[in-house]
Amino acid sequence: MEDILKVAMPKGRIYKQAAKLFHKAGLPIPEDLEEGRRLIIPVPEAKMEFILAKPVDVPTYVEYGVADIGVVGKDVLMEENRSVYELLDLGIARCRMSVIGLPNWEQVINPRVATKYPNVASQYFREQGQQVEVIKLNGSIELAPLIGLADRIVDMVETGQTLKENGLVEQAEIFQITSRLIANRVSYRMKNEAIQRLCDMLQPVLPTVDAK
Ligand SMILES: Nc1ncnc2c1ncn2[C@@H]1O[C@H](COP(=O)(O)OP(=O)(O)OP(=O)(O)O)[C@@H](O)[C@H]1O
Ligand SMILES: O=P(O)(O)OC[C@H]1O[C@H](OP(=O)(O)OP(=O)(O)O)[C@H](O)[C@@H]1O
């Protein structure tokens, strides 16, 4: 069991893109989970086991060592601030973290900011020297300024479609997001050869900077 490399893979929108990369690298994991409910996918021929996790939980599994490595968005890494190594920028699931509001937004004292990323938002406004009240939500963040819950939001933007359809505008970009390969600190030493081999297999199939 010890020489099996355990990989935490996010279910949801990253899975397909990450699985495509692993496939291109020669690792035969299912490219699509479709309706399957299986949470552990062994790939004995590659001495690997894929654990399907909720994206936000991936750094937790990796920090605690129940997964040796994992695939996770930079947004989650910044928010969770777990003690893990970041090994590779996989260049997939590209989007950005931004401050968003209504077009006619006016400066108010101590504005309310709704977000799924309270740590990221608090740190950003602290660095800007702006006092804000952060409200944690779990989804449909764009609703908050429309229904008067918050003055602004901190959320991800990819195509800009969600903003457009809800009459919102991007006010500032906080950082660019792509998915990263992360590793448990102990596994990185104990299973270094296997982890290094995986990185070497992935490296040539990563999207080029232009295509990212
Ligand atoms: N619109 C987007 N475009 C590109 N990448 C995105 C987009 N939204 C999210 N991501 C990236 O994909 C990751 C996972 O997103 P996903 O929506 O699958 O997770 P989630 O919202 O945590 O899922 P869940 O529905 O299980 O709560 C995010 O952490 C981010 O890195
Ligand atoms: O710029 P776009 O291409 O429109 O993508 C951005 C949207 O995608 C994400 O939402 P998601 O689909 O994960 O839904 P939720 O967070 O509201 O649950 C993000 O929170 C934005 O709402």
Image (cartoon, rainbow, N blue to C red):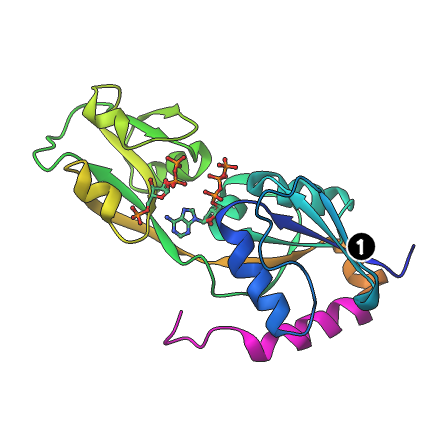
For label 1, the SS is: helix
Residue range corresponding to the magenta coloring? 192-212
Image coordinates for residue 144, horizontal then vertical, percent: 27, 25
Residue at 78%, 46% in the rendered image: 65
Q: Is residue 47 left or right of residue 127?
A: right
Q: Amino acid at mark 1?
A: Val
Image coordinates for residue 67, horizontal then vertical, percent: 75, 49
Residue 32 versus residue 193: which sits nearer the camera? 32
- Mark 1 is surrounded, within 10 Å at the Cα level, by few (under 14), some (14 to 19) or many (20 or more) other residues, namely some
Answer with the quadrant where ligand 2 appears in the image.
Answer: top left
Q: Residue furthest bottom?
A: 204
Residue 1 versus residue 112: which sits nearer the camera? 1
Residue 62 versus residue 159: which sits nearer the camera? 159
Q: Residue furthest front?
A: 35
Say if the magenta span includes residue 199: yes
Q: Which residue is mark 1?
A: 186
Say if the magenta span includes residue 105: no
Asked which quadrant contains residue 139, the reply is: top left
Asked which quadrant contains residue 5, the reply is: bottom right
Residue at 39%, 34% in the rendered image: 122
